[in-house]
Every structure is written in C-alpha cells, then in structure tokens.
Image (tube, rainbow, N blue to C red):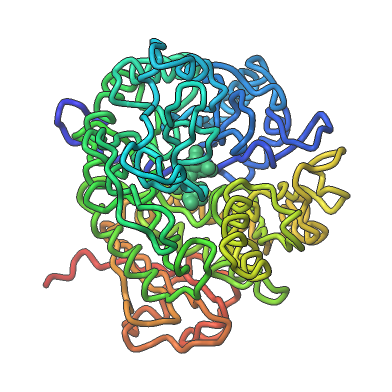
Amino acid sequence: MALDGSRVEDDAWWKSAVVYQIYPRSFADTDGDGIGDLAGITARLDHLVGLGVDVIWLSPVYPSPQDDNGYDISDYRDIEPMFGDLAAFDRLLAAVHDRGMRLVMDLVVNHTSDEHAWFRESREGPNSPKRDWYWWRPARKDVGREEAATPNNWGSFFSGPAWEFDAASGEYYLHLFSPKQPDLNWENPEVRQAVHAMMRWWLDRGVDGFRMDVINLVSKDPDLPDGPLLGDGLYGDGSPHYICGPRIHEYLREMHREVFAGRPERLLTVGEMPGVTLEHARLFTDPARGEVDMVFQFEHVGLDFGRHRFDPRPLRLTALKESLGRWQAGLAEVGWNSLYWNNHDQPRIVSRFGDDGLEHRVRSAKMLATVLHLHRGTPYIYQGEELGMTNAPFASVEDIRDIEALSHYAQAVRAGEDPDEVLRGLRARGRDNARTPMQWDASEHAGFTTGTPWLPVNPNHTTINAEAAVGDPDSVYHHYRRLIALRHTEPAVVHGDFAMLLPDDERLYAFTRRHGDTTLLVLANFTGEAVPVPAGIPAEWLDADLVLGNVAPVDPEVLGPWEARIVRRHHDHHTTG
Ligand code: TEU
C-alpha cells in the first residue's frame, strides 16, 4: 500500500496468503443456544492451523438485531452478546496471533441497522443533527397513487422498494437492502469521519484489516435519479447511480489516508464490490493509488442464471474461462485478484459447478479447488468448502431462514409464480445453502451444538465431516491443505504469468503459470466423462512432472471424469532463441 506513488514491493505478504472465511453463526457453538460463538471459533482454531491458512475473515460479530444475520449492525464498537463479548473477542484475536495467523473483520458501513443510535437519532425528525447521516427524502408530489410516491423508483436487493415510509415525519429513507438496513449518507463528512474513527479503534485493538461489505455502493448520485424499469416492471434499476458512484475512489483514498496510512504492512483490505467492472477494479487495486489491496468481483458467479439469481441456468465453461481469463489478464500488470467460489451468499460450489453425488463429489470438489487455487490472486476458502460440503435439501420454504430468499419467495408467489418452481430456485441458489452448520463430526447436529441448531445441519454430515476428512489422506480437506502448501512453496503459483489455453473447449479448463524458468500447467475436466487431452496441449506436457492431482493418473493422454492435474516443467536456461 504505497501512497507516495512508488510501486509497492512485488511480494506483498497477502499475495502468498490464503484466507479462510468464518460465518460465526454457523461455525461452532459452545453454550448450547444453537448459534455459533467466538469461544467456539477459538476452540476450533487448530482445524485452520492444520489446513495451513494464513488469515481468518470473520463475518460480522457486532451487536445486531440479526435481520440480515449481522449485516445490520446496531453498534460498531461491541460484540453481539450471543457471540460473546469484547473479552472473548480479545481472547480469540490473541489465540489467532499466537498461531501465526491474522484476523480480518467484516466492515459493514454502506448501511447500519435501523436500531443503531445514529439512525434512531436521525429518525427523530427533519431537525435532528443526524438527519443528514442517512438518505431522507419527501414523497413525490407529482404522482396520484400512494404506492408510486417513493422518492424514486429503485428496487431493493431484497425485493420490494428501496424506500421505507416514516409516518412521523412523512418522509422516506433509502435502504438498498432490508428496511432494517438504512443506507448511510457518505456525502456527509461527519459520517465518513465516524466510520474512520471506528476502523482505527479496531486496528488499535489489534485486528489485521477489513473485508468491506458492498463498499462500492457508498457513493450515490445525490440526485438519486430514477433507473430504467426492470423486467418485472415494478421497480427501476438504480445501480447506475450507486455502483461505483461519482465519489467512490475519492472516498476509498480518503479512508486509506485516514485509517491505514503509516500502519504496519501486516494489514489486508478487500472490498466486496457487486457490479464492479475490471476497469474500476484496476483503479481500486492499483497500489500506487492507495485504495484497497483487492476486490471481490461477481462476474464469475453471475454466469449461470437467467432473469435473476434464483433462476438457475447451466454454466457454459467457455463463459467461465472468458470471464476469469479476462480478470487474470486485466489485473496482471496493475492490481491483484481475489479468488473465490464460495462465501456466505453463494450456493456450495461442488453442488453448483461440480457433482455432489456419491461417486464424484470428492473428485469434483478437488478439481474445482485446484483450478481456483492455481489462478493468480489471493484464494478465499469459505467454511466447509474444504470438506466438500454440499447444498442443503430444503424440503419446504419453512426450512429457509434467509431474508433475501424469503422476500424473493413472497414477492414471486404474490406475482403469480408457481411456488414449487420458486422453491426449486431457492434450493439451487439460496444463501442458506452456505449457512447450514459446519460439519465437525458424525454425531447428532454434526458436533456443531449440543442444543438445537438455528438452521438444521445437513443430513449428510454423517459422512461429510471434518473428523472423517482429517483422518482420510485422500479427502477434499487434504487436497486443500496440499494446494495451500503449494502456494507457500512454489513461487510460480503466487507470481507466475497466467495464460489461458483451450478457450473454446466446453469440457476442459486449461492454463499455464510461468515464473522464471518454471512453468506449471493446470488441466481440469469439468465433466463426468473421460476426455482425451486435445492437440492444443503441446505433447511435451504429457510426460511432465505431476505436482498434484486429484486421482492417480491412469492415462497421460486422457483426463478421467472430473480429473485435475498440475504438472511442472523447467526450462533450460542455456537454450537460446
Ligand atoms: O452482499 C452483497 C451482495 O451484493 C450480494 O451478494 C447479496 O448477498 C445479495 O444476495 C445480492 O442479491 C453483502 C453481504 O455479503 C450480504 O450477506 C449482505 O446481505 C449484504 O451485503 C448487505 O449487507
């Protein structure tokens, strides 16, 4: 993170690091209330040491009414009682540091909870000193129908309008997410200063950085113009007016100056940025600009649906390669990629791009891990991904807890869609797939809790669990462990130039990473059928050294179902030409 315009050293520590995301609610419960807690994380840290990860990212643990499972924060400087308290947090942080790992906090500052003191004060009325900390607007005068009187036509990410009416003042407030998540007005410098002060407070406490929730939405066009009507005709798409809005780079540079500048290089910052383009991502992650170290972009997890994210379509492998390949090329010279398949908002990757059936689950989970971890960038593992955890068999909508899924269901059914069809979409794509409890062992509730879990454990925990995986050298877990170890020891994985091969092949994913006199080739079969290695792969690769694979190779010229191989060649320095 160089502010003086100098190029940052090419070996920023996070380039060779692997991050593990914990969703505290679903990780490990020690007090039997069915909800994970900080003491549970502390007790399970050795699972992460065994895996070899460098950094832990904690989803929000601050006080919260839990309308969006903690992404609605009512106090930025404390811990939610059901997770523990500040003393428990300090114990966790010390235990993480004792084991040589770092801890990154979730930073949710596009919005607060409506129960945050700032919003309660803001809501007191138009003369409140904090009125302008949020986006309050009067009803539109020029419309007859009351339901059309919202200040603009934007819809919320969680279905319904992006505006909530406040009867006391007769005004509306903006909420891009739930009505219990009012958006902060970053135009107001007091808001930004309060956020910076809170961030410094956590850094002073010893945390090692932040994952910044929807941080590219904080700059809105203050005119809040209508957007083009969306497919359903109910709401407009406001995103052109708030995705990477007019002052976004200014705000992130200011944050960097006010919060991170002059602090030790041990910090990590990653901005979660739905809708971010490659062009903006280059600016955000150019070290010379001093904004953030890397961003989470969403293109590759947006390729396999139709009208909306609960309308699943099959993935075309060529589209995945086109997208990830373009990001690899676009951030090759300047900036840095983050790499992920999963997080707490995405369905499980083995159920999505792999095959979660009995025969191929382990293999396809390892194949997907191999492809992701061999790209250039910092890989993120979401809890349970290292076990090959799968989507959950939600029987009915009663089994679902997530606000996004439930609001979508209500709106779609109201609009006349077939409830079974809607449920099918949620089952494939809903966020609760990622949120079922971590599967520690085969016992009742998977060793997650002695009480009743807030979301039922997946019945497949009797076979898919950490205890079994750690004890089986051929498990998905040990494959992840080997991939992490490879990143830590093979510079080509960290620094190597990326080149995509076979861009038009719908079955195989293939690329090279070249660094100095080493080149790695990754070959992966995204199907359940055997596929001959095509002529596009030069013959000299067929007898190259196998670095890591997911099956014992049978025939060098054929990739078995879901097979993935990493092979290595050294170039002869003395060869000229
Ligand atoms: O998510 C932002 C985001 O754009 C999505 O992935 C979101 O989950 C939604 O499904 C889009 O349709 C972040 C958090 O990761 C998510 O858990 C929060 O619900 C959201 O912001 C609001 O804080």
Report the side of 498 relative to 31 (left or right). Answer: left
Q: Nearer the viewer, residue 162 or 324?
A: 162
Q: Residue at x 75, y 54 (%)?
A: 399
| Vertical placement of residue 505 versus 41, above or below | below
Q: Nearer the viewer, residue 449 or 124?
A: 124
Quarter placement of the N terminus: top left
Tell me where residue 471 sits by quadrant: bottom right
285 relative to 146 in the view: left or right: left
Residue 310's spot in the image, x, y percent?
A: 54, 63
- Could you tell me residue 498's position as x and y percent? 30, 62
- Residue located 87% across and 50% down the image: 443
From the viewer's perspective, tell me whether residue 554 is left or right of residue 161. Answer: right
Q: Is residue 18 visible?
A: no
The outermost residue toward the front is 144
Q: Position of residue 452 (x, y in %)?
A: 85, 41
> How many marks are shown on the rendered structure?
0
* Camera-nearest residue between 190 and 329: 190
- Determine whether 505 is above or below 181 in the image: below
The residue drawn where x is 31% and y is 65% is: 325
Residue 329 in the image: state x and y as whole percent.
Answer: 25, 60
Placement of the C terminus among the 4 image quadrants: bottom left
Residue at point 62%, 57% (across, down): 409
Q: Is residue 253 above or below residue 431?
A: above
Is residue 272 visible to the viewer in this orientation of the structure? yes
- Residue farthest toward the left in the current orientation of the protein: 577
